[in-house]
Amino acid sequence: MNTNYFVLVPIVIGLLAVAFAAYLARYVLSKDTGTPAMQKVADAIFKGAMAFLNRQYRTIAILAIFAAIIIGLLLALLGLTTKSNAIDWNLGWHTSLAFLIGALCSGISGYIGMYVAVRSNSRTASAATRSLGEALMVSLRGGAVSGFLVVSLSLLGVTGVFLLYGGLTNPAIAPELIVGFGFGASFVALFAQLGGGIYTKAADVGADLVGKVEAGIPEDDPRNPAVIADLVGDNVGDCAGRGADLFESTAAENIGAMILGVALYLATKNVGWILFPLVVRAFGLIASSVGLLWIRPSRVIEPDKAAGKDPGEIAMQQLNIGYFITCGLSIIGVFLGSYLLLNGVGVSTSSSVPAWVWFGLAGTTGILLSIAFVYITQYYTAGTFRPVREIAAATLTGPATTIITGIAVGFECVALPVLAISVALGLSFFLGSQVTILNPNIPHVINPGGIFGTAVATMGMLMSCAYILAMDTFGPITDNAGGITEMGGGAEAVRDITDALDGVGNTTKALTKGYGIGSAALAAFLLFSAYLDVLYTYKHNAAVYTVDLANIPVFIAALLGITLIIFFSSLAIRAVGAAAKRMIEEVRRQFRANPKIMAEDPADRVDPDYARCVDISTRGALRAMILPGLVAVLTPVAVGCILGPQAEAGLLMVGTMGGIVIATFLNNGGGAWDNAKKYIEAGYLRVNAEGEMVDRLDTSGTVLGKGTEAHKAGVVGDTVGDPFKDTAGPSLHVVIKLLSTITLVLAPLFIALHP
Amino acid sequence: MNTNYFVLVPIVIGLLAVAFAAYLARYVLSKDTGTPAMQKVADAIFKGAMAFLNRQYRTIAILAIFAAIIIGLLLALLGLTTKSNAIDWNLGWHTSLAFLIGALCSGISGYIGMYVAVRSNSRTASAATRSLGEALMVSLRGGAVSGFLVVSLSLLGVTGVFLLYGGLTNPAIAPELIVGFGFGASFVALFAQLGGGIYTKAADVGADLVGKVEAGIPEDDPRNPAVIADLVGDNVGDCAGRGADLFESTAAENIGAMILGVALYLATKNVGWILFPLVVRAFGLIASSVGLLWIRPSRVIEPDKAAGKDPGEIAMQQLNIGYFITCGLSIIGVFLGSYLLLNGVGVSTSSSVPAWVWFGLAGTTGILLSIAFVYITQYYTAGTFRPVREIAAATLTGPATTIITGIAVGFECVALPVLAISVALGLSFFLGSQVTILNPNIPHVINPGGIFGTAVATMGMLMSCAYILAMDTFGPITDNAGGITEMGGGAEAVRDITDALDGVGNTTKALTKGYGIGSAALAAFLLFSAYLDVLYTYKHNAAVYTVDLANIPVFIAALLGITLIIFFSSLAIRAVGAAAKRMIEEVRRQFRANPKIMAEDPADRVDPDYARCVDISTRGALRAMILPGLVAVLTPVAVGCILGPQAEAGLLMVGTMGGIVIATFLNNGGGAWDNAKKYIEAGYLRVNAEGEMVDRLDTSGTVLGKGTEAHKAGVVGDTVGDPFKDTAGPSLHVVIKLLSTITLVLAPLFIALHP
């Protein structure tokens, strides 16, 4: 069979996945939307979210068109002026068009995913009045629309542009022409994640500080003018932002792996190396859909029948089973893909074991790494383990020790993920390097089998992407469902269900961040190798494969790479403060201007102007995202132009390392503070007569709950952690991938300036 | 003239500098020690400091002897078993002996420096009763004893071991035999800085939390059992710890530069390349002593004669003039040294400008970098500039925003120092590479002129080391003088002087940290190059000069390097918490057990048991320093043994970059919080009717000073910053140099395991 036909696999399965997302959307939208009171709140959230999204995507579209024109002109000009025939002036429009398609696909998947997510919240709240199982299914499927759209549109987009640029007739050239797609996706993701992250925290701080602290009204109270903005924020940060982040991950990883495949295709004339990433991703979609469909209300034991079991535990267990099903099928899928496409033409192995087994094992390594990340993240952010309890104990001595302990925990929690990544990287490289490519034309400095092994591991890890994203978007949906139940006056038993699902959502959001950083870390080596391959195709000099830290420009660029990460984090954290300030002023102004909002008698009350708060938060966030975004985009461009392509590789690699470490610190530190506060609020913090913390189940201890000094210290920790874990940390995921895609796109420019 | 004779320069000047330190000590010790009340406090501090130092150095001595035996045996065994004649079994005892001499010299300079420093505090307090000028001179000269001893003993030690190991008969081999000296210095510095840093903050937290907050007594009150431990802590952290840190810097930098000189000596047969670092350091001692001697009471305008001028400003101006004199003379010195020793045998330059001018300019780059660091550090930590005011404004909205803003400032402040380092590194490399070495035997992959240029820049920067250290130790002396004046019941006017000098001391301490990290960063490239030179001498393969990040083991080791930095910081911060906890318990116990400490009538009062607090803090700190210390020492050993010498270079480089960035964040972030609190305490925080901050000189604003909510938030920030800037940050300086010295010493082992 002609291996070319395998290109039908991603197309057919991609289209089926889109149809599957449509089916899930229809399922969710067919559900009832609850009482009129719930509908009113849900409508306000829907309008606010769409208003933000419309304005945000309009801003991003302007920036993207501007960027596309600059890149296109620059590369076309380069093609016209450079004597080398390696750069053709067509590269300009090819890259620009791919950039715009990538940006558009990312935008569409974010937009539709958000649309369904903010339509799922009131339906989840309504389902919760009937049963836990139904609420779980509605919220998870609502989230899955986003998850499947993101992965399938990324897959279809990459495959489509590959075919458009002659992928089947000239497979060696096409992958480099489509790098623009990845950069387009990165570009949208950067601003979507930054804008969303700033918005959500500015609204949160505004609602909490003026509403809860100054006016003394509870969380999610309809009298708070910022309450809708706060609920909108959960969607735009976690749903739209993280969706764009993982859209970019999957696109960049696919393109990078295809570029690596080109070298192997040229050596073996087997186009399977190039198509493999697309096929494996398609198999991942099947695995994810089976895992998702496994979860049904009939499998959920309702809380009234489960003696003493927490509804959150029941729901989490279901999600875990679905995840393990997805991982199990993914392992089968990666072996099958290897068998079909990497079956031995032009390769030999060091033993009698065939090549596809080695690559299948490398893919399994990546899948196991994703499971390891799930457990490590849970250890550092869940209240049942040492780190969170340590922070909770530190709240007893005030906010200063709470912060110090949280930072110590955040710094500490970098070690295990890095060790896991190191092992996975080393192991998948070792497994891949058992396969030798029989061609003398490959520069001897590289080990193509080993590098492809790390690429297969990354593909393996990202196979469960759609499922993970479904769990992530599940977070804001259940959070909103909780808010809607609260504001719509739901019954106690219903609130128990929505609160429990909200708690599960916090865990899944943390897991997704861990997964995001883990896959970005694993992908880094593959993208980096792809960049060196691109340099080689232009320069035909094996020296490009060496990124020598003993070389002064490389050393300086590497130092600047890690500094960029820290500096960007500073700007992102600061942006939240700037946007929050406007929000605080507006909420204060409304309370002053319209005292009827807080009227004693509920009959006299008028609704605050929610839309204005949404609008101000939107403007503030969009304005604040520009500076950090530009710094992230322009620094690698400047370094590459001034110090050259090899130095740029140093910036890319060490910047990525710094990003992995700092993002893990910010995400897990922030998550641990958040859960330490929740630990106290759940009544788990108990002290003995000497004021020392005792076990949370030790009934002889006194509970220190809401309103105590310890709780106040816990709130300080949570507030500090908010911009860490929801703005700066997730934005860093995007930045490290942006570094890769921007260098892939601009490699010809750097080479032209430093021939 | 035979160039060998130049070895007399460091010996003669080094001995003169020791004599100069003795002269300064005699000057200080001849001063009167003040009233009996002051003497009583000073004696308690002296006893506490010496008790800590004795116990600490005993612990370090045991660890050092243990380490020396292991290293000696390991290397001797290697020499006996390896067939290559590159490693000789003599290397074992050579390295062990040098290690012990290095450790001993570091210990002696720390011990004597501390002895004089804790004898200078009451003399400064007494001098302050007479005039600002005399107080300034006593405290600065007291600090200078430490500064000159550290630099001269480091110089004499390196020169002595060089001669002992046949430096004049076989200059090519000796530098590699003395790397043990640098490792010995690093080893002592690590534990001295860690132990001192943990001690000082544990005592500080204990004194503040129980004394100030729980018992409600003022700072430096004699009723507080931890007050002496707190005053002792300032000495052991800033004086002994920083002294050991810079002893290591100067030793490691000298040895590394000599190793680089070996390659140039072999190419040109001019031994001047090897002796140059020693001669330049000696010239730096002269420059520093002139700068120091310039400061005399007769030049100080006393506050009562200076209309409206703050005594702190007057003192700072004097210190600045002395520093500029030192820098100016250093520039002359580095040109002179280049002229005498690097005068053109076997080299050519790209223009008619002779080699010594290029190297003189490279040295000047380093001196200018040290000045740039002084200004950058001041900008980020002094209350007159934007960053500190920003944090002060954030205190108005509580502790959470204070912390968030402080972290944003801390992250931001990394950018300028890194840019300055990058420019200095690139420029000195460029200047040095104008000199070409005429010898075909040097591997073409390296640029010996350029690398030596960066080494000369580092030497230039470290020429002012003795002066900088004098200003640093001035800090704890004036801090103690303030405490002694307070506890001894000094007059208002005297307190004004000691408080002003204490404020100056805070600035100089921050400057020294900036200088420490700047010189460590600049030295990193030189030490790294020296390591590659050492690898080359064993392997005779030019491939060792490439540290290729595209190589999986190098990539993984690099990622582990930056993780080590973060993880070590976590352990160091956590160690403070553990040691502070014991202190808090002891202070509480004393208040409970002996109520007479707090008796209403001063006549009924008894003194608390200061010695017990000192003892507990000492034990706690020494126990807590072991784990982070072992992690820092064993990680590079493990990585080098498992992943090999090239990967080790990756760990070294990227770990160093991470160390520079994280240490700058910790130091400057902590310093900014500290000074934001001081800004509020000085009455500079003013708000308008809307509660927004206005200019500190805007008299229409209301002052929010001590006891306000804003001040409480500022105190939280300061407390969070304490372990950052006084424990983790300074310890990281040592860790990054330790990475270099440990790799230099163990290079033969890594090579033997990975031939």
Image: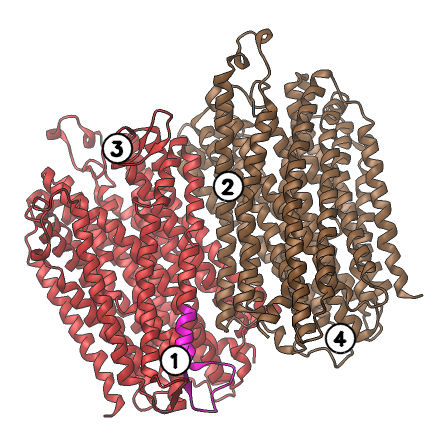
Chain colours: A brown, B red
- Gap between marks 3 and 4, in whole Å? 74 Å
Measured from the top left, where is residue B388 in percent x and y?
35, 43
Which mark is first along the chain, 2 or 4? 4
Q: Residue at x 59, y 30 (%)?
A: A615
- Host chain of mark 3: B
- Gap between marks 2 and 3, in whole Å? 47 Å
Q: Amino acid at mark 1?
A: Ile
Res. B259 mark: 1
Q: Is residue B504 left or right of residue B103?
A: left
State whether residue A571 appears in this view: yes
Q: Is residue B705 above or below residue B259?
A: above
Q: Amino acid at mark 4?
A: Thr
Q: Amino acid at mark 2?
A: Ala
Residues flagged by tags 1 and 3 on a common chain: yes
Which mark is first along the chain, 3 or 1? 1
Q: Is residue B432 magenta?
A: yes
The residue identified by callout 4 is: A436
Mark 3 or mark 4, whichever is nearer to me: 4
